[in-house]
Image (cartoon, rainbow, N blue to C red):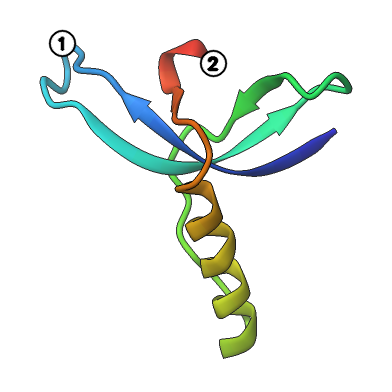
Amino acid sequence: MTWNHRVLYHAPTDKNPDEWFAIHEVYYDENGKPTMCTKEPVEPFGESLDELKEDMQWFLAALDKPVLNFEDF
C-alpha cells in the first residue's frame, strides 16, 4: 500500500456549516485507487530542519494534484 499527502475538501455539515480544505495522508490500493485517509489533517514535521523542509515539499506537491472529497472516504 502506498500513500502521499493530498488536499481534501471538507463540505459543510450540520456540525460545521463552513467548507474548508486541508492536507491529509491518503492511502492507495494496489491499483492506485485512493481508499483511506487520515481522519484529521496532518501537519509538517521533521526531526531536523532538513526533514521539515522535505516534508514541506511533499505538502506543496499536494497542491498540484486534484483535490479529493473527504466524504468519499
Measuring 52% from the left and 48% from the top, which residue is drawn there?
A: 62
Q: Are marks 2 and 1 in contact (CB under 8 Å)?
A: no
- Residues 29 and 48: in front is 29
Q: Position of residue 67 (x, y in %)?
A: 44, 30
Measuring 17% from the left and 18% from the top, which residue is drawn there?
A: 15
**Which amino acid lies under the numbered mark 2 shown in the image of this protein?**
Phe
Instruction: Please tell me how crowded label 1 is: few (under 14), some (14-19), or many (20+) other residues with Cα within 10 Å.
Output: few
- Residues 17 and 58: in front is 58
Measuring 45% from the left and 59% from the top, which residue is drawn there?
A: 43
Q: Position of residue 38 (x, y in %)?
A: 55, 35
Measuring 48% from the left and 59% from the top, which residue is drawn there?
A: 60
Q: Is residue 8 above or below residue 47?
A: above
Give the alpha-carbon distance from disc 2 to disc 1, as whole Å.
18 Å
Q: Position of residue 12 (x, y in %)?
A: 19, 17
**Which amino acid lies under the numbered mark 1 shown in the image of this protein?**
Asp
Instruction: Please tell me how crowded label 2 is: few (under 14), some (14-19), or many (20+) other residues with Cα within 10 Å.
Output: few
Residue at the far bottom in the pictured view: 49
Number of marks drawn: 2
What residue sits right under mark 2 in the picture? 73
Q: Is residue 34 above or below residue 45?
A: above
What residue sits right under mark 1 in the picture? 14
Q: Quadrant of the N terminus?
A: top right
Q: Is residue 37 above or below residue 3?
A: above
Q: Quadrant of the C terminus?
A: top right
Q: Kindly tell me whether residue 48 is visible in this rendering.
A: no
